[in-house]
Image (cartoon, rainbow, N blue to C red):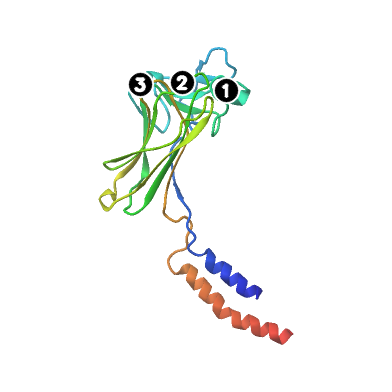
Amino acid sequence: MKITGVLVALVASIGVAAANPILVNNASFETLPPGGLPTACGAPLGCTYSTGGNIPGWTVTGGDTFTGQLRPGSASGNLTFFNYVPDGLTIGYTDTGMLSQTVAATAQAGVTYTLLVDVGTRADGFFGGPVVSLVIGGSTIAATGSRATAGNWATYTATYTALAADAGNAIKIQLSSTSTQGDFDNVRLSDSLSAGVPEPGTGMLAVLGLVGFLPVVRAKLRRRA
């Protein structure tokens, strides 16, 4: 009975699919530019930021003077701008600019791509009409999400299933703001391809081998009894 249970568990485990993460460079903005974050945010404890649009791993277009990385100091107990940071200490921000990144993976027909980005609302009232988009070939998919309450964060999501015409097209992430400061963190991209699934036939061969071995095990158990 116990052997049969092991066999059932093994069969059930074959073909289990999980979302496959796609690498996003500097996804949580923890890698700082060469000059670091040289400017203090006035009196607030632990708050520093960069300007000029130099964000490692990302391409900045427009608004680069007021685009960079920000450590709001929430880890030091400063809640002037945010109550917390979703991942790490640093976020990316832009005023009327755009942060974009084309990942190494390209689109495959029939595969679903999901983009998740945490978008913040500053506690002091800044919420600059942030726009999060997933771009595959000629298709731009705007992420949807509900605005976070002051000082907090909300996750915006964009999902797209690639068509035959999309095969081989680049996959790009775009983070922008239509007015005042947009704040972003914890960028995650995944596809619906199975991760860690055995090569075709490999798992089933293992099951068949176990099935063939069961009579031998049972015979030995009977002789011992």
At which x and y percent is residue 129?
Answer: 39, 26
**Residue furthest toward the top?**
43
Vertically, is 26 above or below 70?
below
Label 2: state its secondary structure.
Answer: loop
- Please say if the residues under marks 3 and 1 sit with CB atoms less than 8 Å apart: no
Vertically, is 220 above or below 32?
below
Q: How many other residues sit within 10 Å of disc 1, few (<14), some (14-19) or many (≥20)?
A: many
Task: Name the kind of residue labelled 2 in the image.
Answer: Phe
Q: Does residue 27 appear in the picture of this structure? A: no
Task: Name the kind of residue labelled 1 in the image.
Answer: Gly
Viewer-proximal residue among 128 and 93: 128
Q: Which mark is residue 119?
A: none
- Please say if the residues under marks 3 and 2 sit with CB atoms less than 8 Å apart: no
Give me the residue at 27% from left, 53% from top.
Answer: 164
Give me the residue at 31% from left, 53% from top.
Answer: 109
Vertically, is 48 above or below 120?
above
Task: Name the kind of residue labelled 3 in the image.
Answer: Gly
Ranked by sequence position, the earlier of labels 3 and 1 is: 3
Give me the residue at 29% from left, 49% from top.
Answer: 168
Give the quarter of the figure containing the C terminus: bottom right
The residue at which mark 3 appears reads as 63
Q: How many other residues sit within 10 Å of disc 3, few (<14), some (14-19) or many (≥20)?
A: some
Marks 3 and 2, how far apart at CA: 16 Å
The residue at which mark 2 appears reads as 126
Ranked by sequence position, the earlier of labels 2 and 1 is: 1
Q: Quadrant of residue 66?
A: top left
Label 1: state its secondary structure.
Answer: loop
* Nearest to viewer (mark 2 / mark 1): 2
The residue at which mark 1 appears reads as 73
Marks 2 and 1, how far apart at CA: 17 Å
Q: Is residue 41 left or right of residue 170?
A: right
